[in-house]
Structures are given as C-alpha cells and as structure tokens.
Amino acid sequence: MTHSLGKLGTGYQDVPRFKDARSRIDANSRTAQVALMRIATRLAAAFAVYALACGWAQAGSITVYTALENDEVSVYLAAARQAMPDLHVHVLRLSTGDLAARLIAESAAPHNDVIWGEALTDMLDPRIEAELAPVTSPNIAKLPSRYRAPDDKWFVATGYLAAFCVNTDALAAQHLPMPTSWADLAKPVYKGQVVMPDPQSSGTGYMIVAAILQGMGADKGWALLKQIAGNVAQFSPSGSSPCKLARTGEFPIGVSFAFTAMQSIRQGFPIRMVIPSSDVAYQLEASAMMKTSANQVDAKRFLDWIASPQAAALYRKYKSIVAMPGAGPTPEQIKDGLPADIAHRLYPMDFKASMENRAATIARWKSDVAN
Amino acid sequence: MGGRMNRAVRTNHPGVPGDRLLAWTFIGLPVLGLLLFFGYPLIVIGLRSFLGQGDVLSLAHYRRLWTDPGLPRVMLHTLWVSGTTMLLTTVAALAIAMALHRSRMKGKWLVRGVLILPLLAPSLVQGLGLIFLFGRNGLVHRLTGLPTDIYGFASLVAADVLYALPQAVLIISVALVRTDRRYYDAAESMGASAWRQFIDITLPQAKLGLLSAAFVVFTITITDFGNAMVVGGSYRVLASEIYNQVSGQMDFGMGATIGMVLLLPAILSLYIEHVASRQHNGSEHALPSEAPPGRGRDAALSMTCIGLLLPVAVVLATVFYASFVKLWPYDFSLTLAHYHTNLPDGYTPILTSLKISIAVAIFGTLLLFMLAIGMRRLSPALARIVAFLAMMPAAVPGMIIGIGYVLAFNHGPLSHWLYGSLAIVALCNFYHYHTQGFLTISTGLRTVPAALEDATTCLGGGPLQSTRDAVLPFVAPALVSTFFLLFMQSMVTLSAVTFLVTPELNLASVSVMQLNENGFISQAAAYSACIVAVVAVALGLMRLSTARIGIYLQQRGKLHVA
C-alpha cells in the first residue's frame, strides 16, 4: 500500500502544483503506516498470549490410543484424574486389530502421545515398535523384568487369559459334560457345539493357536487344533463374539477371553468361566510412548501412573493378569472361575515369536485346518 | 449420451457470454472433488498392492490370489452371494417400485416408511435382529421349539437383501415414475393385457433403472462385510477377507490387493453408461399417470410388499423390543436401564453425526446435480470417462476408503485442515455413496423432455435458465431422494469412518460398534433405537421443507409442460 503511494508520488514530484498534494499523500501514508504498525503490534501481542495459552493448555494434555474396554477405561481415567488433576487425557478406544492398523496407517505423522494396553504381539510389529521411545520411571522399574522390554520401549501392566464361556443352561439342555481343557473340546460329544474366534481376523483367535502350538509343540499342537476345528460350529470374526453367542444360548461353549466371561457373569447370564487346565493362552497388554510425542513429560507421568500400585488395585476388578506383584485374584474372580494360582500357571510365551510366525501360522491354518 | 450431446451443440448459442465458463464450473468442481477425495486416496492405497517385501515393485500379492489356500474358494463364495443377492433384490425392488408407482394399492405410505427403516439403523441392527429371531436360541425357536440355525449362506443373502433393497427401490422408482401415459393408453386400446404392457412397456422403459439398481446391489454386497461378520458364520467373503488381512494380520498390501480385485465389477458400469447413451429421453407430454384400476394386480403387489417388508419390520421391531428387555433371552421384564449408556461421550456423537450428515446431504446433492448436468455438455468419450469415475466408489470397500484417507490425508499439505475435522468425515461419507446418488440423479435426468430444454435454450435462455426452468422440475424427485439417501447413509455408515474418529470426534455408528465390541449388546440396541428416532425426526422435518420446494417446482414444471 505505502509502496504504491510512494511510486505515485515520485512520478509527479517535479510538477510544482502537485507538490502540495504529494506531501498530503505522504502525510496520509505516514498516518496509515503508524496505524498499521499499531495494529500489527497489537496482533503480535495477542498472538503471543494466544500461543502461550495454547502452550499451557497443551502442557497438561495428552492423546492416548487404547485397546482396553470402555467400561474399565472410564474407571481408570477417573482415578488418574484424581491423581493428576492438571493432566487432561484424551482417549480413543479401538479394538486391538483396528488400533494396530491405525497406528501403522498414521505412522508418517502420529497424532497420539501414548499407546495404552495394546496386545503385545501387535506392539512388537517392527512397524509399530519403530515408532516408540524408551521410557523409564520409578513405578515401571518395579515391574517384574518379564513385563518390561529389554530396551524400555514398552511395559506391561495387565493381560488377559483365554477362557471358555460355558452356558450352563444350554449345556444342561443338551446333557453335555463341563469341558475343562483344550483336549476336551476335541471330544466327539461337542461336535457342532463350540464357537471359536478365527485366528485370521481375531487377535484372541491367534493367541489361542499360538499358545497351543508353543505349549504342546508344533506336531501335537496342529493335530489337536485340527481335531478341535472339526467340532467348531463357527469361527467368529472377533474374540468377544463367541462369548456373546454363548451367553444368549446360541451355542453352549464359546472360546473367548476372561474379561468378557466375567462381564457376562456380572450382567447375569447363566455363564460359567472355565480356564483350560493346561496350556493356558494369554496375551499381555503393553503400553508405550510415541517417539514423536510433543508432550513427553506428561506422557511419562501418565505411563508411570499406569504402572502404579494404585492403578494395579483397580485392575484387579477387571483383569485376569496384573503385572504388579502383590495380591492374586479377588474372591469374586475366584468365584467366577479364575484359578487362585493363575500367576504361576502361565507358560512363558514367546510373544516375539508369535508376532514373527503369524503369517506362516495363518497360512498353515488355512491349508490344514480351515479346509 | 451421444444424441443429447449433438442436440446441445446444435442449439448452443456461441454468443452467450459465460456459458462455457458456467458449463466448465459445473463439470469441473465435482470432477476435481472426485479426483482429490476419491481418486487420490484410492491410488495411495492401491499402490500398496504392488509393493512386495522391502517395498520393491512386485505382483506377489496378486499371485497369492490364486496360490493362497483359502482365497479362491472365498472368491467363489463372494460371487455366489453377491449374484444371488443381486437377482433377488432387483426382482423384489421392481415389485415394490411397481406397487408404489404402477398400482392403486392402499397404504403406499406404509410401504415407503418400512422400506427406509433399514437405512436408518446401523447395519449391526439387522444382524442382531436376525439372530434374536431365528438364531439357535432365538424367539422362533423358543416359541415353537423348531431347530433354527441361521448362520451361513442363506442368512447372509437374507441380510444382504434387506440391506440393499431400499437403494434398489429408490433407483428403479425414479425410472418408473415418469413413463409416458400414452404408451399405456395405446396398448390399452389395442387390447394388450396388463402382463403384455408390463413386458413391452414398463420393462424396456425401466431398463436403465433396473441395470443401475442391479449394478449398485452387486457392488455394495460384494464390498460389505458387516453382515458377513454377524450372520455369515464361517462363510467367508472377500470383504471380510480384507478385514482379516488389515485388522487381523496387519497386511495392508494384501488388503489393498483384494480391494483392487473388488474394483473389477465397476467395469460393468461402462455397460450401463452405454445403455444410458441409447436410452430415449422423456417426451414433452409425459405426465405421471395414475395406474388404471386392476384388482388382481393390486392384490398381488400388496401381497408381495407384505411378504417382503414384513420381515424387515419384524427384524427391526425385535431389536427395538430387545433394547427394553432386561436380559435377553433370559429375563423378559422391561427396563429403561439400557438407555443409560456407559459410553464416556454419551449421546453427543449422534449430534456430531447429524451435523456431518446434513452437510453431506446438502453439498453432496448439489455437487452430484452439477456433475450430472455438466456431463450433458461433454463429448461422449469424455462423458464416459467421467461416468466411470463417478460410478466407481460403490465398488470400493469402506475399509479401503478409510485407510486410503488416513494414508493420504494424515500428513501433507491438507492434513492441517482435514485431520480430525468434521469435513474429512463428511467428504469420506459423500464419496463412499457417490455412485448411488449419481445413478439416481442421472436416471432422473433421463425423464427430462429434450425438446423442452432445447426450446428454453432457443428462446435465449443460458444453461442456468434451461437448468432452472426445464431440468429442475423433472429432476426434483431424484434430487430429493438423493438428498435423503446421502443423509441416512452418512448417519449410519461405519467401515470407513472407524479410521477417521479421534478422541474429540466420535460418531453415532462408531459408538454402537464400541458398545457391541465391549459386550453391551442391549445398550448397542438402545443406542441404535435412539439413532433411528433422531434420524426419523430429522427426516420428518426435512420432508416438510422439501415438500414446499417440491410443490413450487412442480407448479413451475406443469406451467411449462402445459
């Protein structure tokens, strides 16, 4: 603006009768300049305040992606808010598979600071592991070493077990015995009575297959899986759906996980939870910080809280595996069917191998078992 | 399309200023949108199908389609399910459209009402309803003791037919609504039977609508995995295979490859465009005619409607009932407890979805209308390319669109505005349902009397005038239908938007999915019932306002035609 006025001025400056007009234009442009400057300063000041405010707001605010269930998440978050009133935690809840897919899809520019409770098998995917930054903190350090990554990139606060959801009504109506082990599921009496998650689509389904193969060895494991598959009425897409089908009496036995089984019992369905007597299948729920996080201080605070004894006390209400050493299952959990000595019955699963063998295992599943 | 084009050129006044510019804006804006918000994400995800180990170019994924132990069988399953669904749905939709537009059947409003029910509710509802009713421990079994077992092929087809029926009826209706009365008058005076009239007049006149409907049904069943997940049992189709690859095994490359295979049916749309280009336009005296009396016909069509739509109503009513039942199927005492949702966001996601869906309906209808009008000014070859692009979205599974959006817009110049915004969800929903809207409006455009439009142009009207005075009154019903279709689909669609929600932006359909995943099925039913209620109220309000516009346009149309 001022620039063009100046140009206009130079063109006419030799003509005397325009001189007066020119100085007036110059004066005008000077006033305009001053006014513009003033506006600019104010804008800058306002912007500085705004930026500062934003900075503060962000200082106490983190984004968390989680695969934990909604009902438990609200309980944990309420407690976290009490422990850290200045920290705002924004949570997005997705199923384990969708969460892993989302993390991989967003990897060019992640939008979250923290991953909370993702299946360890998925967390170990090199594409996800590469996005993580090591975290150490007093509470995390107290966890047993098998629940921490050697390079501190993740730690485990909780986990879940595979469990049979057995509908006692439906079982009685068909005069079937209560199954207690994987081998039981292969017995001819259960033909067409079992629903199991499909390892091709469900993390729980793959966890079960991996546990049986690791626990029994490949030969015995595949033989048993084939026998069980012969009895399976339906391979369901998700890990919770077999339990949901069993609790409404669609099928007497749903192979699912302990969280859904205990929840179904709480809701009042005629369900009995059975943890297989050997080769217990389980998954660990890992948490980590993204290396791209802009709020690493707050992310670490939150992760430290996840590993805290206060949080562990809350986990016991929902979780079949709590990493923090201490009390075992609650009396209510034992009544629901969780063995009191469960912590000592866990086979030391190799989750890294689970992750690496997934494609090959599923290919063999498709050619040998599912056909 | 060719015939139209020549006429347009012949009558075009080269001297009208701004004519060209306007025509190019009409075609340019929608095509630009298609390229940027459909083509670009599709290419980004499509490229993954050609990347092998170590990100080198390879066809390994495509080879696996044949060598994989499961996939060839899954492909056969898919063709079998989608083919059966396509045949059944198209025939059923034709019967219902006949009942609505070619009969004096009583209670048409009821048929219309029940028909849109499946569109109002999240897709989970139909699956749940079928299980609650016909499952091994469903109501039918409990009441009659019959050994019911629905999981597998038959129920998958049933659920798919319920899902696709409303969209097929919509497209066929638009084709039937303005067949020239004089064809029937002439046939009547020559003593042709009602059946002959149906075979010789109605069917040929509705050919384009039937083909378009069949195409839409085939592509949307081939790409839907919601029904396969709930009632398919162990019966696997390709769309569920994409889910397996992406969310089950984190193999984006293989998921993208199957997505690309599912694009193949889009080639069929070229044939539709070919038929469309040969179809005659409506004649200038074509008035929607009241069907002649025919008791036998009305009775038969009524029975067909009842037979087809009663299951739809019963399935949805069962889920509605279940949302009030304390513990399905063990304690049938009634309670409102399930309406007290334990989701952290409560019911606010419904409002978010409402906002997005209204925007999708308004801007989507406008863009589609511009595209359909603009295409009439393109050369046949160019029009064919644009039409192919416009009809492709239905062939892309929602999951592929969703991941494509994340990969394309999560970073880069647009991400700042788009990531986590209402706009990205709206764009995604619009382009996901682009095909259905496009086919409805193009089918509607065929009813515009060509001579009328030419007359307007000859009298000195520019494209804007001829559009307003000649085209709009005839296309209005198709526009209104498209508006409502986009609105309803956008409210309940799930597979793509799962990838676009953020902690601050949650949607109604995603909330239902979360409740279901978390094991609160009755709460999911209650939440769905709330969505249905909100959408129904919104539809009612919008109907009232569009009815006014419709009356205005119709009066305009009558004035001109008279």
Image (spheres, coloured by chain):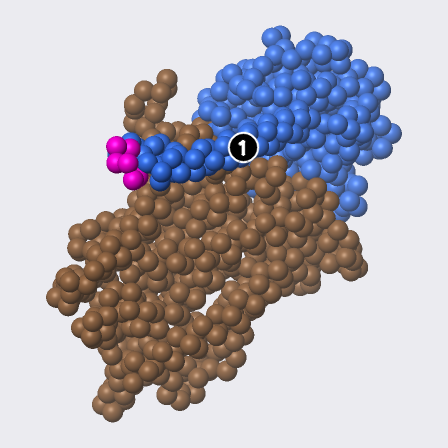
Chain colours: A blue, B brown
Left or right? Give the position of B455 relative to A23. Answer: left
A352 inside magenta stretch: no
Foreground of the two, B131 or A301: A301
Give residue A55's position: percent from left, percent from top: 63, 26
> In the figure, residue B50 lies in which quadrant?
top left
Tell me if mark 1 has few (under 14), some (14-19) or many (20+) residues whose alpha carbon lies within 10 angstroms of its own.
few
Give residue A67's position: percent from left, percent from top: 63, 31
Give residue A299's position: percent from left, percent from top: 66, 21
Foreground of the two, B511 or A326: B511
Foreground of the two, B543 or A169: B543
Q: Is residue A331 visible?
A: yes
Q: What secondary structure is found at the residue carrying circle 1?
A: helix
Residue drawn at the location 70% of the way across and 56% of the way down: B323
Q: Is residue B404 visible?
A: no
| Total labels drawn | 1
Foreground of the two, B229 or A96: A96
Q: Bounds of the magenta span?
A: A13-18
Instruction: Please identify the quadrant where the N terminus of chain B is shown.
Output: bottom left
> In the figure, residue B275 lies in which quadrant?
bottom left
Q: Is residue B405 above or below residue B290?
A: above
Give residue A269's position: percent from left, percent from top: 76, 46
Q: Is residue B285 above or below residue B428?
A: below
Left or right? Give the position of B378 relative to B521. Answer: left
A17 inside magenta stretch: yes
Left or right? Give the position of A64 relative to B210. Answer: right
Residue drawn at the location 26% of the way across and 85% of the way down: B182
Instruction: Residue type at mark 1: give it.
Output: Arg
Residue drawn at the location 57% of the way across and 54% of the way down: B354
The residue at which mark 1 appears reads as A38
Q: Chain of mark 1?
A: A
Q: Is residue B115 above or below residue B195?
A: above
Residue drawn at the location 15% of the way across and 62% of the way down: B15
